[in-house]
Image (cartoon, rainbow, N blue to C red):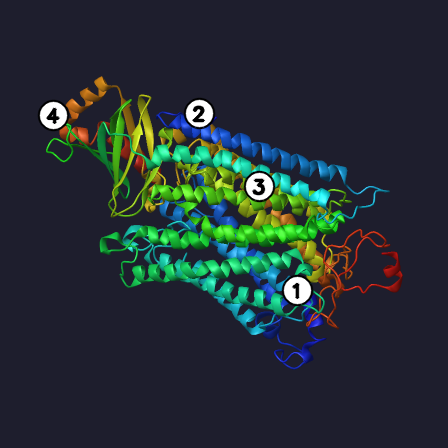
């Protein structure tokens, strides 16, 4: 259902979408029951000549069932929602599948920057690739991210992944994603972070292993490292920012 | 506003806190009064004025969202900083300076003594102080627009470190003024809530048992209990945040041993019960109106009270559902998902009771009744969409999107705005001694309801499509620049303009009817509760003779009686005793 409004591009996007669909069906049912009952009663018991109102306290034995039956049905529906909600949550947020790659994400007013291992595959070595505003990842690979903030709260959100995690200064919060679709997608900041909150956009570029290897080669060659760190379209983006500010 | 004054003479002498008798100066009559009805009017008019300001702020930022970068007529250019201030102060005003003063304080003050058969609040001077503190807090909040850096823009939740440090929020003075204003507002409502609870528990007319108290009074009392029990942690948090801002302490600064998440827990421990503080009075107002205009006894008076208390108690253990993705231990989310979804049980029951009350009734669609029924119909949308956000797995996606914005406006708008109009149109005859014009009232109703849905239904879709909150321009987010999303944003903004236009009908109706409306009798709606047994408007001291209560408030269409209503204070005549 959500796919109609926002593409899904991670392994857990579908499970979140299914959960949302399940909730929509259940609450949609109760919503319709209540609204239909409301409007039907409004129409049926509108004031008419010769129809006197009835005296009903609602505490008669045969009438309390109109409250107790929904009571148990709503509890049942709650359980039907709670169980999958927790299962999805445990899968996305509470467990970490073994990492194939690790990236470090830094948030600050008002930009995203990323650190990932270079060709040696090890983080915190001389050949680490650091980028601003752009994160290049391989499709179908389990990534762990280590999310940090340098100043205030931010939130790392990739709508197509159905991923959202606040960044808290003083902590490193680890999470994971596994992209299933190649392409360029938005990274949003979804936590109010000050004046430039509306400018704190980033891109996540999901690539095939070949594309990713080619990118890594370009990004880690010393001559091009500088231009890789500030990709060419950042300049275009800067003018865009200037435009928006104006 | 002129009519309550004439009544003020009648009982002035019997009250030590009113100066002498006869001519009371303007100052003492309107500004320094301890009469609960006058304090209610002060709260009502201040809250309504602030609602207009809050609405204006919404108009400005909705215009920016529909036509980004254009000069907004009546405001000017919306810069990112100003945009943040606009949304922050809009949220703060609408919750703390509109919903609470109008629903809790204005209706609480006006209705409680009249409905329980008491001449005034138990502590009239504390009541007066409550309003004065409230007024000061409102002035401080509004003054923050004028200081250097402008008004606070760190969202109404005021999360540190952004709110704690002027280097981050760029509004060092504005953020402190916001905090002081909020803290003072809490003081005002602690004083008011104290009065509501004590008056209801001690000031009831002889014969009025707990089960005979009208639902709206119960709801305001329970709301006050929830507020008083939840606000303590937030006041502590506010003081810590103030120290962080002004004295350089580090309560929320991780670099100095503090923790930003501590604020979130303190804030939401208060913030979630606060939702019910605003909701319950509106539910109470609705209960009074649907029983009167359906000529029906409430379907299970006790059920309503039990479910209200259950909701109130549960509302204290759900706060972390606002923080699922904030960096709390993920295992906590499982507990809070369960408690959050369980709160749907008592609330659903309560709504079912309201709907069932219509069964077998004789429904008159007067303006107050339309507002009350629309409250149920619209609040249902807010209620069911909350399930998406309370279910942790789904909240990962919806958190901080416009889906949340649409959801809570479908709870707050029915509570604060629909509830306010329901109450005002229903008790206007009692408050001002005149009837409102029904035609104008219905035009205003339909315009407001249609526009309201036009504003917020599109936002469910933009939220589901990934629009995140508090963004003044989506130009940099390629997935949110799709034209169809922009159409929806524009539709929503047009809704705001229609909504504001239709308020003219209400304002005209309100002020025109003060002078030219048909004179209201004591009991124009043929209602049972005690406020309808005194003249409209009630004199100072309310009751010429304190009433005695013989029955519950919802005895409509009682078998064996000629009239289809039975006032709470009407003694049983020997004839009736035989018939019943």
Determine which residue is flagged by label 4. A221
Q: Secondary structure at mark 4?
A: loop
Determine which residue is flagged by label 1. B1
Q: Is residue B84 left or right of residue B353?
A: left
Q: Residues within 10 Å of mark 4 (few under 14, many from 20)?
A: few
- Residue B478, compared with residue B206, is above or below; it is above
Report if the CB atoms under discs 2 and 3 are less than 8 Å apart.
no
Determine which residue is flagged by label 3. B452
Q: Residues within 10 Å of mark 2 (few under 14, many from 20)?
A: some
Determine which residue is flagged by label 2. A3
**Residue A159 in the image: x percent, y percent?**
37, 31
Q: Is residue B571 left or right of residue B99?
A: right
Q: Is residue B409 left or right of residue B288?
A: left
Q: Residue at x 42, y 44 (%)?
A: B335
**Residue B143 in the image: x percent, y percent?**
43, 60
Circles 3 and 4 on the same chain? no
Q: Secondary structure at mark 2?
A: helix
Point out the tag, 2 or 4, that comes first from the N-terminus: 2
């Amino acid at each position: 259902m959500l796919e109609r409004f926002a593409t899904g591009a991670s392994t857990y996007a579908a499970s979140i979408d299914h959960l949302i669909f399940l909730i929509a069906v259940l609450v949609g049912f109760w919503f319709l029951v209540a609204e239909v009952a409301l409007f039907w009663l409004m129409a049926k018991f509108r004031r008419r000549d010769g129809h006197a109102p009835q005296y009903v306290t609602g505490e008669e034995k045969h009438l309390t069932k109109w409250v107790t039956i929904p009571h148990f049905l709503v509890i049942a529906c709650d359980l039907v929602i709670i169980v999958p909600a927790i299962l999805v949550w445990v899968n996305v947020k509470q467990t970490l599948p073994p990492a194939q790659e690790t990236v470090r994400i830094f948030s600050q007013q008002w930009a995203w920057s990323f650190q990932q291992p270079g060709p040696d595959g090890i983080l915190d070595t001389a050949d680490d690739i650091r980028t601003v505003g752009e994160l290049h990842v391989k499709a179908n690979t389990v990534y762990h991210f280590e999310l940090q903030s340098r100043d205030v709260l931010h939130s790392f959100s990739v709508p197509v992944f159905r991923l959202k995690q606040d960044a808290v200064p003083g902590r490193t919060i680890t999470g994971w994603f596994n992209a299933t679709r190649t392409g360029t997608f938005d990274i949003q900041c979804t936590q109010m972070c000050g004046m430039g909150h509306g400018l704190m956009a980033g891109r996540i570029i999901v690539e095939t292993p070949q594309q990713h290897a080619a990118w890594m080669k370009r990004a880690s060659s010393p001559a091009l490292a500088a231009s890789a760190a500030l990709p060419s379209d950042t300049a275009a983006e800067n003018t865009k920012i200037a435009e928006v500010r104006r | 506003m002129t009519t309550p004054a004439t009544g003020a003479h009648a009982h002035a002498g019997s009250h030590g806190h009113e100066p002498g008798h006869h001519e009371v100066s303007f100052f003492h009559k309107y500004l320094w009064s301890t009469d609960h009805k006058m304090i209610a009017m002060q709260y009502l008019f201040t809250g309504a004025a602030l609602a207009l300001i809050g609405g204006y702020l919404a108009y400005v930022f909705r215009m920016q969202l529909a036509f980004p970068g254009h000069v907004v007529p009546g405001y000017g250019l919306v810069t990112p900083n100003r945009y943040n201030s606009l949304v922050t102060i809009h949220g703060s005003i609408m919750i703390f300076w509109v919903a609470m003063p109008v629903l809790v304080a204005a209706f609480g003050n006006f209705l409680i003594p009249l409905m329980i058969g008491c001449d005034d609040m138990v502590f009239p001077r504390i009541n007066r102080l409550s309003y004065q503190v409230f007024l000061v807090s409102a002035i401080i909040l509004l003054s923050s627009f004028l200081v250097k850096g402008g008004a606070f823009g760190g969202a109404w939740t005021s999360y540190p470190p952004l709110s704690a440090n002027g280097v981050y929020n760029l509004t060092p003075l504005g953020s402190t003024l916001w905090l002081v204003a909020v803290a003072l507002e809490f003081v005002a409502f602690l004083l008011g809530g104290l009065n509501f609870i004590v008056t209801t528990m001690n000031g009831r007319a002889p014969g009025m048992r707990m089960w005979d108290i009208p639902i709206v009074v119960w709801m305001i009392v329970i709301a006050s209990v929830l507020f008083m029990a939840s606000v303590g942690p937030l006041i502590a948090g506010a003081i810590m945040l103030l120290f962080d801002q002004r004295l350089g302490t580090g309560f929320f600064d991780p670099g100095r041993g503090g923790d930003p998440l501590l604020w979130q827990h303190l804030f939401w421990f208060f913030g979630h019960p606060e939702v019910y503080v605003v909701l319950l009075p509106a539910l109470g107002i609705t209960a009074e109106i649907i029983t009167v205009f359906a000529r029906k006894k409430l379907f299970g008076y006790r059920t309503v009270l039990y479910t209200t208390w259950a909701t109130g108690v549960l509302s204290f253990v759900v706060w972390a559902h606002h923080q699922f993705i904030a960096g709390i231990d993920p295992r906590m989310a499982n507990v809070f998902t369960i408690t959050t979804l369980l709160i749907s049980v008592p609330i659903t029951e309560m709504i079912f009771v309201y709907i069932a009350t219509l069964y077998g009734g004789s429904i008159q669609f007067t303006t107050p009744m339309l507002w009350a029924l629309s409250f149920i119909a619209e609040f249902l949308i807010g209620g069911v969409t909350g399930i998406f956000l309370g279910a942790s797995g789904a909240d990962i996606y919806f958190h901080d999107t416009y889906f949340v914005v649409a959801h809570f406006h479908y709870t707050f708008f029915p509570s604060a705005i629909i509830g306010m109009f329901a109450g005002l149109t229903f008790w206007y005859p009692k408050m001002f001694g005149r009837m409102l014009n029904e035609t104008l009232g219905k035009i205003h109703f339909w315009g407001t309801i249609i526009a309201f849905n036009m504003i917020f239904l599109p936002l469910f879709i933009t939220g589901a499509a990934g629009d995140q909150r508090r963004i003044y321009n989506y130009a940099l987010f390629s997935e949110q620049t799709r034209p169809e999303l922009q159409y929806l944003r524009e539709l929503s903004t047009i809704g705001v303009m229609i909504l504001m236009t239709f308020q003219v009908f209400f304002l005209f109706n309100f002020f025109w009817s003060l002078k030219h409306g048909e004179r209201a009798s004591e009991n124009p709606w043929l209602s049972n509760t005690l406020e309808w047994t005194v003249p409209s408007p009630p004199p100072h001291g309310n009751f010429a003779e304190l009433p005695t209560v013989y029955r519950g408030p919802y005895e409509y269409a009682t078998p064996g009686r000629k009239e289809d209503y039975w006032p709470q204070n009407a003694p049983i005549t020997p004839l009736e005793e035989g018939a019943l």
